[in-house]
Image: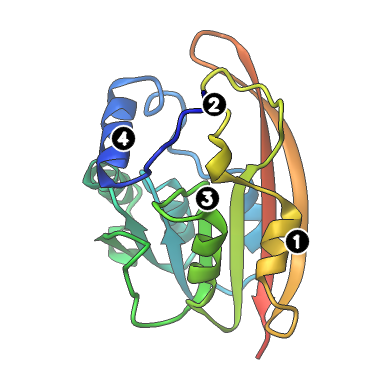
Amino acid sequence: MTEQHDFDRDYWERHWQQAQHGHSRASGAGRPHRYLAGETAGLTPGTALDAGCGTGAEAVWLAGHGWQVTAVDIASAALAVAAERATAGGVSERVRWVEADLTTWDPGTRFDLVTTHYAHPAMPQLAFYDRISTWVSPGGTLLIVGHLHAPGATGHGHHPPAEASVTLAAITAVLDSATWEITTSEEHHRTVTGPAGQENTLHDVVVRATRRR
């Protein structure tokens, strides 16, 4: 039977508390995801929202590269680590940490960049992407990095649950061409080494789009 996940506050608090006591924090989890630098290289720094920021690797990287960042996560355990990283990186004044549920939170403003990396809130994944897309300013950028739906993928604990994975076609269908110009739409496959030395094949989807003026 396939295990179902609620992805609610309790789930994520447990996840990040366990991560702090496991290998995740010590094995380079502070590095930003590999796609962020390349996909934002040509953008002029402005305001950014990191939706589902976890322990803050992307938010801290963005702040270090001139962005004024609002970083939102539901788990206080993750945000505590994130704030420590911002302080250590000397960018704490450029990041506003917000503990909130992204299924109900309203930022009250729009951003030049809205990005999310493998975030799974307690709502359908595509509905989440549609929701955060409304927070992008005209002329701004939406960057989605998620788990590609890849039946039969190997993971040994790293393979995401089915309800958290998506296809490129499904994401791009959410982004109406009258409103969005899609500039990146890619699938990536990478191999990582787990804590016990096992190799895991991970499958990613990367979509970047510009909101038309």
The answer to whether marks 3 and 2 mark residues whose Cβ atoms lie closer than 8 Å is: no
| Residue pictured at 60% horizontal, 62% vertical | 143
The answer to whether marks 4 and 1 mark residues whose Cβ atoms lie closer than 8 Å is: no
Q: How many marks?
A: 4
Of the two numbered discs 3 and 2 on the same chain, state the one appearing first in sequence. 3
| Residue pictured at 68% horizontal, 85% vertical | 212
Q: Amino acid at mark 1?
A: Thr
How dense is the environment of label 2, judged by Cα within 10 Å: few (below 14), some, or many (20 and up)?
A: few
How dense is the environment of label 3, judged by Cα within 10 Å: few (below 14), some, or many (20 and up)?
A: many
Examine the rendered structure and indicate whether residue 3 appears above or below residue 75.
above
Task: Find disc 3 in the rendering and name its residue.
Answer: 117
| Residue pictured at 33% horizontal, 33% vertical | 15
Disc number at residue 16?
Answer: 4
| Image quarter in which the C terminus is found | bottom right
Of the two numbered discs 4 and 1 on the same chain, state the one appearing first in sequence. 4
Task: Find disc 1 in the rendering and name its residue.
Answer: 184
Q: Relative to residue 158, is residue 123 drawn left or right?
A: left
CA distance for labels 4 and 2? 15 Å
CA distance for labels 3 and 1? 15 Å
Q: Amino acid at mark 4?
A: Trp
- On the image, the x and y values in percent for residue 170 come to 70, 58
